[in-house]
Amino acid sequence: MLEKVNYPEDIRKLNLEEKQILAKELREKMIDTVSNTGGHLASNLGVVELTIALHSAFNTPIDKIVWDVGHQTYVHKMLTGRKEKLDTLRQMNGLAGFPKVSESMYDTFNTGHSSTSISIALGMARAQEIKGEKNKMLAVIGDGALTGGMALEALNDVGSSNTDMIVILNDNEMSISKNVGGISLLLSKLRTKGLYTDVNIKGKKTMNKIPIVGNRVVKMVQKAKRGIKQMVIPKMYFEDIGFRYLGPVNGHDLEELESILKIAKAQSGPILIHVLTKKGKGYKPAEDNPDVFHATSKFDKLTGEKIGKSKFDYSKVFGKKLLDLAKTNQNIVAITAAMADGTGLREFANEFPERFFDVGIAEQHAVGLAAGLSRAGMIPVVPMYSSFIQRAFDQLVHDVAILNLPVVICADRSGIVGQDGETHQGLLDMAFTNIIPNFTIMAPKDFKELEAMLEFAIGLKNPVLLRYPRGGEQIEFEQHEEIKQGKCEVLQKGKEVCLIGIGKFVARAYQVAKKLEEKGIEATVINARFLKPLDEFVMLQYMQKAQIVVTLEDGTTKCGIGTEMERVAFENKLNVEVMKLGYSDEFVKQGTCEEIEEKYGLSEEKIVSQILQKKEELKENRRGNGWLKILEKR
Ligand SMILES: Cc1ncc(C[n+]2csc(CCOP(=O)(O)OP(=O)(O)O)c2C)c(N)n1
């Protein structure tokens, strides 16, 4: 069946049985492919029927779907002209793991971060309204994503208008792990009220005929109407905030799904359809462990076993060290925004449930909560993926930094993360905290230094950003000086070249120095440790002696260590050019970390050759014709 289907118009020609076969084949192809590429398997297995039904019932791409997070769009991609490319998923120049408007006219908006879909769909729906266009606008959002503040703000806005739009709530009771919070409780109440039937739609229509005007009698009738409605259709929450609620409906029953979608299509105003799905549906290992198969690496599709050893990574080192520290310091509390496993907090959560808070996908609230806990004497530690911290910029400024509260923000997955692409690269955290007064910013060169820095951070009396990359350490260094506020560590002394690295790129600096040594070039290697406070005094001494200063950072060079060292050179009138290596002013697309580093000139070999080239340039300048080149460059 899949062979026959390339675009949604092909699905619309199929009968129910054929669509069911298509669903089966889509699952097989996904399991097959993702077992080789890795990716978000469980969420995609859960939306197979929903995606088929959406493209059957609606006239896509004229009708438009915004997928929240967008990690569940593999089926959508296969049904919209991209099935042949599925095996390039998440690879450099291949299909993206999230929707991309540049990839297909069926991808309405780029997503990746959670809880944005309702705002975006509402914006597009309102634009359509203004322009007099009649197509349907849909947002598909999971119960996890619905815990995010932006989604709740958008629901509030939709409800106050009569804008024509449909929210599909894909409720599988899971975020990455089990969903949490009051919204989740509300949904479980709705779930238990029995599945959607024609009767509740008809009943609704009759009751809606009771006029709604302002005299007392009518108000009494209205009150009674609400009461009856509550009994018959216990869905008042969404109704009360202005939606027409349809459901719950079995998200794996194609017939039911299509019929409810068609009912929704025929109505106007804001509608919410509550769809119940099973994360991992149709693949036993993923059904049994949907959290493990939320985002998976390569696996053996017969057994579900992951391929390759599970390596010790920075998140695990962090989690283990925090647990140790918390055993002797009762004031340590940990907060996660729905990422307990990814950030290494699972053991902490098990051991100290009363000191652990999973707030849902709510990074802003996580930081606000940390500020409150800190003000009341606790030591909050908040590990979040670097790119998700972007959500909480104002909370970092307004709630944490202005009061100079000792909150430890840990930027996990900082720097290049690889295959998740632009939305997930953690390139901005150093830059945006660098401009916030009171923040200390540090990054370890290896696991051992992370442990020392975490302990140090917990003892500080001001806000801290502690950043570390995805994956493992590059080198296990022998040298580990004691961590002191604002002090760098000199790993090697040389003359001609001064390499200043921070975090993951200290190891790169060290390896580059070794390569230079082989070519007879002596280099100093400095582990900056702190971006703020910056050890200007010590670094300046080494910069003064060098012909070439090279800074290396796994982040944007704007407002990072490169910019800082350039400033130091300028302010101290040093006659030295600072080569700022890192990522400049652009969004970095998907690929493996190695491929991306190679592309941006950050591999060992590329760095060495840039330094050699610079040396040549300097030699030429000294020979006297350099001024011409400089003028040409300008
Ligand atoms: C702002 C933000 N924080 C965290 C994440 C990481 N994340 C990706 S998917 C996901 C869970 C989403 O759950 P749900 O919306 O219910 O979708 P499901 O995978 O269960 O289908 C999380 C926490 C993210 N993408 N964006």
Image (spheres, rainbow, N blue to C red):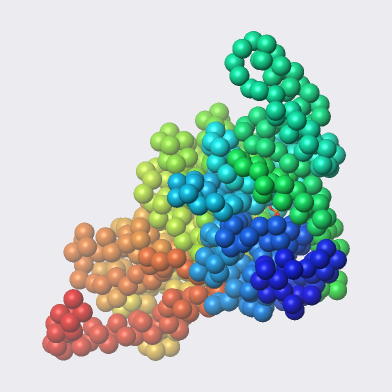
Above or below, 538 against 322 in this view is: below
Report the front residue among 135 and 607.
Answer: 135
Measuring from the top left, give residue 107's x and y in whole percent.
Answer: 57, 63
Image check: 532 left or right of 317? left
Q: Quadrant of the C terminus?
A: bottom left
User: Which residue lies at the image location 65% right of the left edge and 29% below the top edge?
Assistant: 240
Q: Farthest residue to the top: give it.
A: 216
Residue 301 can be seen, yes or no: yes
Image check: 297 left or right of 66? right
Measuring from the top left, give residue 452's x and y in whole percent.
Answer: 56, 54
Residue 414 can be seen, yes or no: no
User: Which residue lies at the image location 37% right of the left edge and 43% below the top edge?
Assistant: 437
| Tally of marks | 0
Q: Quadrant of residue 229?
A: top right
Measuring from the top left, give residue 54's x and y in whole percent.
Answer: 69, 58
Image check: 604 left or right of 166? left
Report the front residue among 264 and 30.
Answer: 264
Q: Quadrant of the N terminus?
A: bottom right
Measuring from the top left, give residue 74's x and y in whole percent.
Answer: 67, 67
User: Which residue lies at the image location 55% right of the left edge and 28% below the top edge?
Assistant: 376
Above or below, 403 against 465 in this view is: above
User: Which residue lies at the image location 61% right of the left edge and 12% below the top edge?
Assistant: 215
